[in-house]
Amino acid sequence: MSDDPSATTAAPSTSGSSGSTGNGADSSGSTGAAATGRTVPDAFEANRRYLGSVAYRMLGSFTDAEDVLQEAWLRWRAADRDGVADPRAYLSTVVTRLCYDQLGSARARRESYFGEWLPEPSVSYQSGPASPADLAELGESVSLALLAVLEQLTPAERAAFVLHDVFGVGFDEIAASLDRSPDAARQLASRARRRVKDGGRRATADPAEHRQAVEAFAAATARGDIEGLLAVLDPEVVWHSDGGGIVTAGARPVFGADKVSRLVAGLVAKWGTPDTVIEYALVNGEPGLVWYLEPGVVGGVIGFTVADGRITSAYTVVNPEKLTHLNPAAAPPAV
């Protein structure tokens, strides 16, 4: 189960390449595949999927991740590639530093953002688990809830946490990317880990339990059944929403099962129509919901955290600017 950005309908930062070198080349693209008549990929193309996954998890935005990959590609073209001993490590360092710079400017933009800022969701309709190779290439799933918590970290803490705890990058490499000592990088990751633990919502690791709660929520929502919603919502549930000032959405989180159930029932009564289509999907690797304004046009995505069979938080993204990567016709071209 993966929240790989390439699993969305169009995430240009990672589309166009599987991320693995199934044609016989290693990550540097330097094997002798020419002997078989096959083209050896450039190292950037060979690692594009991995680099896009790192950038998305660092930034929480496909748009910003694409900007980073565009710049990294330009720098790779201008680099003395013959002098690069490990292209993957070199490119990872470039992407990490660009993301680090982006996080600084993004924080200022997000402080002036209308309402809550939530990450751009990754959506996949993959039903089975990811292969070990995919997990190694893309890192573990990073839920919308975790990406939202990562917004509370400093850029250096976020970089250290994502690289080490998600992708398993060693502290020596992280230190080189952040211009810190390995001990300092280790301390950054440790501090980030504590802050993530303190700021996160209670959640279960059982996908079946998670899916069951989402199904119960969807069924109660479709009926406008407040009692049914109360039964599946944790008493201390928190509802987050992001309309970006473009689409109507709460400017602040809504707390408590009673308020959230009435909010959801009211939204359905006001905006729901017989033609509304809602589908189950993997939202950042976890069971969630997607609904459509019309065929092929996503109107919103909801990711959930679940504990003890009840929903403890919901993250609803309805800002259309954060959903364009899910609509193929609107997606920008690949690098």
Image (tube, rainbow, N blue to C red):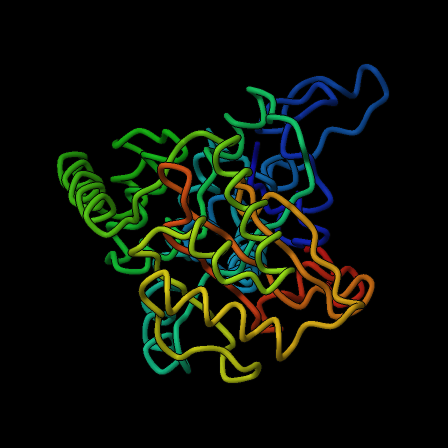
Tell me, yes or no, if residue 95 can be seen here: no
x%, y% of residue 280?
66, 47
Residue 133 sits above or below residue 13 on the image: above
Q: Residue furthest front?
A: 227
In the picture, which quadrant includes the N terminus? top right
- Quadrant of the image occupied by residue 103: bottom left
Residue at 68 percent of width and 72 percent of height = 272
x%, y% of residue 160?
28, 43
Which of the two residues, 15 or 250, is positioned nearer the viewer here? 250
Which of the two residues, 203 or 271, is positioned nearer the viewer here? 271
Residue at 50 percent of width and 84 percent of height = 245
Residue 249 sits above or below residue 175 on the image: below
x%, y% of residue 114?
42, 82
Residue at 80 percent of width and 15 percent of height = 35
Q: Residue furthest right?
A: 37
Q: How many marks?
A: 0
- Quadrant of the image occupied by residue 164: top left
Which of the two residues, 288 or 50, is positioned nearer the viewer here? 288
Which of the two residues, 61 or 89, is positioned nearer the viewer here? 61
In the picture, which quadrant includes the C terminus? bottom right
Is 326 displayed left or right of 302 in the figure? right
x%, y% of residue 64?
51, 63
Residue at 73 percent of width and 29 percent of height = 40
Is 298 displayed left or right of 62 in the figure? right
Residue 196 sits above or below residue 227 on the image: above
Tell me, yes or no, if residue 17 can be seen here: yes
